[in-house]
Amino acid sequence: YLLDQPIDDDSVTFPELLQTAGYQTGLFGKWHLVERPKGFDDYRILPRQGRYQGPEFISPDSDERSTIQGWSTDVITDLTIDFIKSLDSQRPFLVMCHYKATHDPWDSREPHRSLWSSENEKIPEPPNLLQEFDDDQAAAKRTTLKLEQINQGTFPHTRLENVSKLEQRRHIYQQYIKSFLRCGRVLDENVGRFMKFLDESGHAENTIVVYTADQGHFLGEHGFFSKRFMYDESMRMPFIIRFPDGTGAGTTCEDMISNVDFAPTVLELAGVKVLGSMQGRSFVSNLRGQTPKNWPTAVYYRYWQHLLHRDVTAHYGIRTRTEKLIYFHGQSLGMTDYADTPPQWEYYDLQRDPAEMVNRINDPDAQQRVEELRSQLANLQRQIGDKPVQ
């Protein structure tokens, strides 16, 4: 599985290209790859996910882990700011600040840890919190991402006795969403602290800031916690950018992008040539309000860890502005315990059904669009060099 496989030695990353171009480079926080980072002058990375309190770090000059006292989110911000303070002010820099938050067990520290502590304080429920699945959504029906199935190791919580699974789900949801929001409050506080540092130090005048994530997250939608499914709450992720000249301040770009576009975009912004072997394309023009005429109108998604985590089936699909088509694998992919897992397609009309509640794959009125999307999906796979098994 890719998180446990080394990066190909022949692969060149965008930090390496920036480093070669004269940029000072640093990385602090989550890395979660089997090999140490390449292309960074300095780094402090968490072992895998790391821990919130008293985090351990791996550095380039030692095989030993060092512990820094404090809360992980605070410590990573401190490391990032200290690195920038140490730099040669006459040379450009790239710094990547990777927080563990907001990851399970969604812990927090004071003063935020005491927020919403009363059981009488209720956080609104998503409309489809109590959704139940039939055979048209077999992969979702099978998964153990449902809140009532969360274990204590992932998230310490209380449970009710002698209640239905949906009552249990509602009970756990309140604990889960409050913990997630408390964890996020510490993150928000540190992002604000970092931005304030850039402003007060003068770096904001010539520094581009990007805020993004590695995926979205279920907050009770479909009754789920965590991530992985191609449903929108998990598939969509934030991408916020601030230019020092205020270009496009307060605006939203509606164009569709994916994470393979990030590296070419950063390289173009830095004035460094993009390698032809890189996947994706730069969306700098889009950010400046000049969308290329041939810009993609759909994005490709793939989740490859077949039934490895919480019985989520490996799947891939295509999302346009108004529709989504998903293929869930059926074969065991080497996992004999699930050899009888049937393959399945799911199709959603996101204009009629934005919450993705009704799989219309067998709707006679949808068949033409399904076939067109299958063809479009195959084209996207070829463009990106992917060859999923069907």
Image (tube, helix red, strand yellow):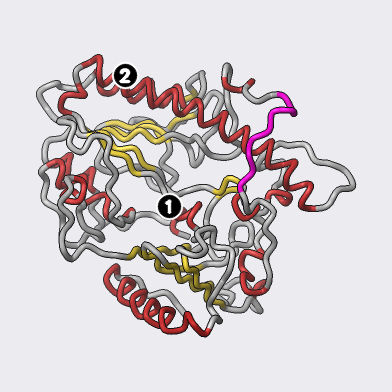
Residue 75 percent coordinates (x, y): 44, 22
Specify whether residue 366 is painted magenta: no
Q: Nearer the viewer, residue 186 or 251?
A: 251
Q: Which mark is residue 327?
A: none
Residue in view at x 40 percent, y 43 percent: 213
Q: Earlier in the sequence, mark 2 or mark 1?
A: 2
Residue 368 percent coordinates (x, y): 41, 84
179 vs 60, left or right, is: right
In magenta, the rendered stretch is 118-126
Residue at label 2?
A: 196
Quarter holding residue 292 = bottom left
Residue in view at x 59 percent, y 75 percent: 332
Q: Nearer the viewer, residue 166 or 110?
A: 166
Residue in view at x 54 percent, y 39 percent: 103
Q: Which mark is residue 236?
A: 1
| Residue type, numbered disc 2 | Lys
| Residue type, numbered disc 1 | Arg
In the picture as drawn, the residue positioned furthest to the right comes out as 162
Give the alpha-carbon distance from disc 2 to disc 1, as whole Å. 28 Å
